[in-house]
Image (cartoon, coloured by chain):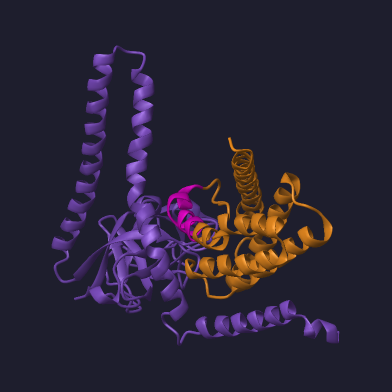
Amino acid sequence: MKNAGLVLLSVLIASLQTTWLNGVNLFGARADLLLAFVVVISLKYGIIYGGAYGLLCGVLADSLSFSGFGYNSLILMYMGICCGLLKDRFFDSNGGIVMLTAFLCSFIHKLLYFIFSKYIWNNQDFWYVFFTKILLGAIFTAVVAILLYGITVLYNRIKIRKGRSRYYGF
Amino acid sequence: MRDLFKNKFFITLIIVTVLFLVLAFVYNSDSVKAPFLKSVIGTVVKPVQSAFTYTTSGIKNFFGNFESIDKLQKENSELKDTINKLNDRLRKIEGMEAENQRLQSLLELKQSNGQFKYVAANIIYKDYGGWYESFTINKGADDGIKKNDAVVTSDGLVGCVTEVYNDRATVLSIIDSSSSVGATISRTKDNAIVDGDMNLKDKNQCKLSFSSKKSGIIVGDLVETSGLGDVYPKGILIGKVSEINDDGKEIVISASVDFEKIFEVLVIVGE
């Protein structure tokens, strides 16, 4: 049931990003909702979930993107695994870690993509794209990640409260 | 090291990585026109995206009503109801009027260029990553759309079809950095090339370049398709010259189509 809900949520987030939120940008920078979702899921549920949902969200991103197939699938899967590893081996997730990890993941994701697909082949102006799309985009993604994390924390609290009510017969 | 290869997670990871590298290699080669996996996933996600797109106006109206109610709460209850209803009607009429104007201008374009066959289409969603200025329309091979068909609006050239599925197609717009269009300056008849640029696309602009050095281009000159290259028919308006820098070496044109505000397009499917 949890998996079905998370898969549905991934599809909804991908659809939201390509429709309503597509026009929401500041200086051309957009938040990457799917990446933020992968970071939150990985830091909450660990390496296996991180890898699996990273791959799923990557395949969705590749399918809805004009760019070639494969880059998002692999990089989101590895980012999910790395974030899951952080959670499993080093520290429990909290707002600060979610924000920092989402920022770093988004920064690396966008930077690598730009270097491989645009900068080398099309000789684009590096610094303009670095400051607007990459850096600002990573900040937006970090902000979205903290919002998503806040929603999951709130959801869990409500769930626990409901569970207690049932247990005590309220 | 041996233990690592006994680890199921590690083995799965290697298999998935190799599989996706192979898929990336196969799908990104030019010989494959419409990747099967992209087609299947697109079909699954399309209804959700269509629902999001078509409910946008409903939600905007919904929040718009709240704004109106907040303002009208200060007035008496009778006027509040009346104004609310009138505002609601006005918003709907304005929306219909704008849509009517857009469709009217598309119809005029269709009638004035009778030599072309057009297919009208709506935009379903835009590119995921924000790196490309591309979007997907709700008509595909079933409606006669083919790869490299030109896409226009009443304002001018939008781009060309790059991927075709049965029920939808992907369009790459002219302001994308990977786009290149053969062009002619209307006034001087000089041939040029309009290239998309990463730094200019957010301003709805692109670059104009010439094969040899040209002079006499002035701000305000209209740029249209040259018809060279077999993708875009001749004489479609691309935009007008808005900036000339560095002694005419760098020319910027403003696209005639506002890419932030297109909802319907016409695909030229033949003559």
**Helix, strand or loop: magenta stretch:** helix
Q: Quadrant of the C terminus of chain B?
A: bottom left
* Residue B267 location (% of width, % of height): 27, 68
Whether B94 is drawn above or below B127: the answer is above
State whether residue B217 appears in this view: yes
Observer-nearest of B248 and A108: A108
Asked if the stretch drawn in magenta spans residue B33, the answer is no
Q: Which residues are magenta?
A: A11-24
Q: Position of residue B270 (x, y in %)?
A: 22, 76
Name the residue at 75% across, 50% down.
A97
Q: Is residue A127 above or below residue A144?
A: below
* Residue at 43% in and 50% down: A20
Q: Nearer the viewer, residue B228 or A119?
A: A119
Quarter residue B136 falls in: bottom left
Name the spot of residue B84 as percent of width and height, x first. 27, 25
The chain shown in orange is which? A
Looking at the image, the residue that sits furthest to the front is A169
Q: Is residue A121 left or right of residue B196?
A: right
Q: Nearer the viewer, residue A26 or B219?
A: A26
Q: Residue at x 52, y 62 (%)?
A: A4
Q: Quadrant of residue A40?
A: bottom right
Rendered hue of chain B is purple
Give the total of numbered labels. Answer: 0
Quarter the N terminus of chain B occupies? bottom right
| Residue A13 part of the magenta segment | yes
